[in-house]
Image (cartoon, rainbow, N blue to C red):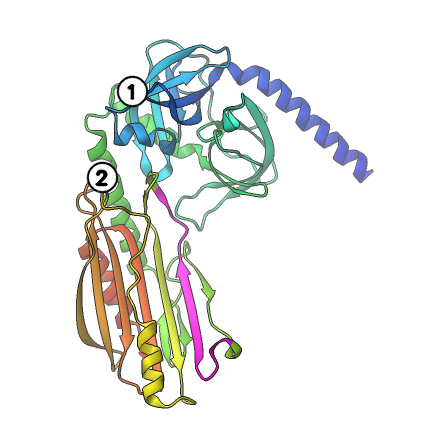
Amino acid sequence: MLLLFGQSAVVQAVDRSSSLYAEVQQSIYQVRIINRKTGHKRTIGSGFVIERSNLLATNYHVVSAYTNDPTTYSIEYLATNGSVGTLELLDVDVLHDLAVLVADKELGRPLQTAELPAKGATLYAFGNPLGLGFSVVTGTNNGLLTESEDKNILFSGNLNSGMSGGPALNEAGAVVGVNVATAGNAVSFLVAVEYLQRLLEKIRTQQFQPASNLHESIVAQLKVNSSEMLNRLQTNPWMLESVGSFQVPSRIDTSINCWDGSETDEERGLVTVISVNCSNEREIYLDEKLSVGNMQYQYTWYAGEKMIAPRFYRMYELQNSDDTSSNATKENVTDFKCETNFVQIAKQNFKMSVCRRDYLRYKGLSDVLVTGAMVSQKQQGFLFELFLTGVDFKESMRLVKQLFENFQWKN
């Protein structure tokens, strides 16, 4: 009976995907970024007709090359019947990876939107995987990731490159999400349609005209994100956990996960190493070499009572080095500038470095690296490292101050 029911459910899903395919294929397009000099594609994604017959929704990352360099690139659509036309960018929501485009002609029937169905419901993701043609992927709605900052939908289906920006539909053929990313093994993510609805509402207030200064709008969105994130972190209730002889803040937000990074006695020999690594999963895409919104921090405790003090100090000194590597390039950011001081935290002496580099195109935003090394114990050490990307520097320093004020020495 269970086997027969399972087969029936599969047949029903296949039948519905076939009928949906026929219903919506005229409203789904390939979106292409074209180099004006060569006429060749730089990137491709998918898009769908929404709100009006000449509007297409897609992902911001699909059109980001054009957004960052409109003199070099243009935007085109490719229809399922092979017709090609030009598109103009109206506005974007860079925080939720969305963009809305407009054509100079009608493109098809606008798809309707709907609330996300219950967990376990079948969803149908449409797009143009790898540029191979119009396709549909059937999968399961596993609900909103409510503890993440993106609040994306977890979709059990195999989205592929080129499907970004395509619609995910419910059984009735209404849009409940926008294809955005995959982690492989049928683990994929959709942008919740409510964020597209908010972007469309903003475009309505603009009378369906392009944003007056798109870059300024993107910078403003990033600043709001920085402010909201840092304020939320500072007002959250913090739990402390033990790392060696310190009590320190651990998971300071639901979007942050902490993992053990300790080394075994066999790996370290005479030194005991206890380490905790915490980070969020936020990556706000700006271009191929730049994303912001990430936060990482690490606590590491060293106990070397079995080692003579001079040898322990040499080992400990080697661990205390600033790592400022990232994907950002000199075209994106300034060099790091650092200031080092000796301070007292939880009645222990620390050598503290605060490093900052500023974004060149996104004024008012910086990457911040803070490192601290306890220097008041002969055979014990404690290292702290915090790395924030795309934040307001002054606001980030208030968070750092609050973190250190919560350190407690247990001995």
Which amino acid type corresponds to the residue marked 2 in the rendered image?
Answer: Val
Q: Position of residue 175 (x, y in %)?
A: 49, 27
Q: Is residue 341 magenta?
A: no
Rendering quarter of residue 48: top left
Residue 6, percent from left and from top: 75, 36
Residue 337, image x and y in percent? 17, 58
- Residue in the image at 28% along x and 60% along y: 234
Residue 87, above or below 376: above
Viewer-proximal residue, 224 or 117? 224
- In this view of the protein, which residue sits in the foreground, 362 or 290? 290
Determine the secondary structure under disc 2: helix
Q: From the viewer's perspective, is 363 left or right of 49?
A: left
Q: Position of residue 315 (x, y in %)?
A: 35, 79
Q: Quadrant of the C terminus?
A: bottom left
Between the residue at mark 2 and the residue at mark 1, the CA separation in whole angstroms equals 29 Å
Say what secondary structure mark 1 lies in: loop
Amino acid type of the residue tagged 1 in the rendering: Lys
* Disc 2: CA contacts within 10 A as few (<14), some (14-19) or many (>=20): some
Q: Earlier in the sequence, mark 2 or mark 1?
A: 1
Above/below status of 128 relative to 104: below
269 falls in the magenta region: yes
Residue at (26%, 66%) from the top-left corner?
402
Q: Which residue is mark 2?
A: 219
> Mark 1 — residue?
37
- Mark 1 crowd level (few <14, some 14–19, many ≥20, 10 Å Cα): few
Visible in this render: residue 257?
Answer: yes
Q: Bounds of the magenta span?
A: 267-284
> Which quadrant of the view contains residue 35?
top left
